[in-house]
Amino acid sequence: MAPKTRDAALYLRISMDRRGDGMAVDRQRDLATKLAKERGWNLVGEYVDNSISASRINVVRPAYNQLVADYEAGKLGAIIAYDLDRLTRQPRQLEDWIDAAEHRGLAIVTLNGEADLTTDGGRLFARVRVAVAKAETERKSQRQKDANAQRRERGEFRQTSRLFGYTVAGQIIPEEAAVVRNVYERFVAGESIRSIQLDLAARGIQSVRGSVISRPGMNRMLTNARYAGRMTFDRQQTGHLGTWEAILPGALFDTAQGIMTDPRRLSKREGTDRKHVGSGLYFCECGRRVRMTGGKKGRDWYGYTCANVCYTRSGRDIDEYVEATVAAWLDQNKVTPHQDEAANEEATDLARLRERLAQVERDYDDDLIDAQRYNIKRAKIMAELDAAGRAQQRSRASAALASLDSSKTPSDAFLAAPLGIRAQIVNEHFTVTLRRQGKGQGSRGFRPESVQVERKRAA
């Protein structure tokens, strides 16, 4: 009696194609095709998951999922796999295939002849085989966890993929390390993440994967403690130093973290993006801050409006005058870049205060303090955070001056600097007051005497 003809499919998989040439899958295909011909089955499909593991249930296997869907749609009567664990290593998935073989007539054949799910002995063997494979996977996972824990204790550099700035072995790549330092210095000096990202893209600087560094990629770069030579686990600092060379000084990294995680910035959704140098910086002669307005007279027009509706003035001429005045002052006073030596202490203070605030919140959540004590403690810490934040602002201004291009004159370096850095220098060293220009003939033109730029302190 001739064997029953079935519509059969090949399922081909290898966990890791180390050679990258697909030869392992090709060998499976040749043997499976030969077996199908021997059985007289009609091959109607081929499903390939190359370099995809079946050990973890959360790993998506696109070809496997399509195989299941096609079987459920009645397109397949037989499945050929190299080995049972090529098809699945999950007990739950195996039970589904056993049900299909035992009650719905699906033929599952392996090239080693071990799988016969239509008999109780075959089902027992399959269940034991999958259970053993599952146990091996769990033991391997535990060994990897233990090995990683040892590496952390020894302070070894460990990355599943290459970290920008370092080789896989943890050696510094000078040109990439210079980019990392530049990103941190510009961010601490006041430039927005978006502005830095666009500049990197314009300069053709790419991620380790060869693509433009994305906004999430910028956030990861600005929060990765490995750049400061510190051990991490699940992206959190372990409190131990690594054995590799740091790209960043600890003070610079901590200052950046203070900006990224400042509770006031997060709660108020205050970003670091800035469109014009005077945004949020200038004052009216009445004592109120002016706000920026735009769009009334064309897309490129913007202006500054007093909160008391004293006036609305065109902003472009004002900003150009303010920047020219500051540039001239930098040249006249021969301002040289310098770093604030107190930056490390200020970053430590901010980190300590943020931890105190988090501890108070945990105590309140655990009912260790009542609402009244919580509010008193929180108000006190927030006041200290405000004071520490102002001190850090001074450090950021020093960083802004230090980030200027030392190969140019101070004025040229200032005017060529990113917008956020220019605004940081203006805000720290000057008070800008806008006055009403008056009425009558000539009031529509820009009059320099209507903009008062006063120096706050000597640099």
Image: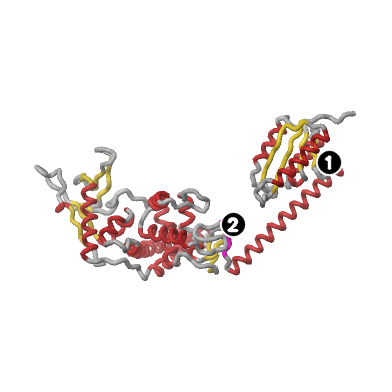
Looking at the image, residue 122 sits to the left or right of residue 192; the answer is right
User: Residue 208, image x and y in percent?
Assistant: 52, 53
Q: Is residue 180 magenta?
A: no
Q: Do the residues labelled 1 and 2 touch (CB within 8 Å)?
A: no
Most frequent secondary structure within the magenta stretch: loop
The kind of residue tagged 1 is Asp
Mark number, residue 226: none
**Among the two numbered marks 1 and 2 on one chain, the one whose residue lies closer to the N terminus:** 1
User: Residue 89, image x and y in percent?
Assistant: 73, 47
Residue at the location (60% across, 69% down)? 154
Residue at the location (90% across, 28% down)? 1
Residue beneath disc 1: 116
User: Residue 55, image x and y in percent?
Assistant: 70, 49
Say which element carries label 1.
loop
Residue bounds of the magenta highlight: 157-161
Say which element carries label 2.
loop
Q: Which of 46 and 236 is in front in this view?
A: 46
The residue mark sitting in front, 1 or 2, is 2
The kind of residue tagged 2 is Thr
User: Residue 146, image x and y in percent?
Assistant: 66, 63
Q: Which of 175 and 311 is in front in this view?
A: 175
Residue beneath disc 2: 160
Quarter occupied by the C terminus: bottom left
Q: Which of 373 and 350 is in front in this view?
A: 350
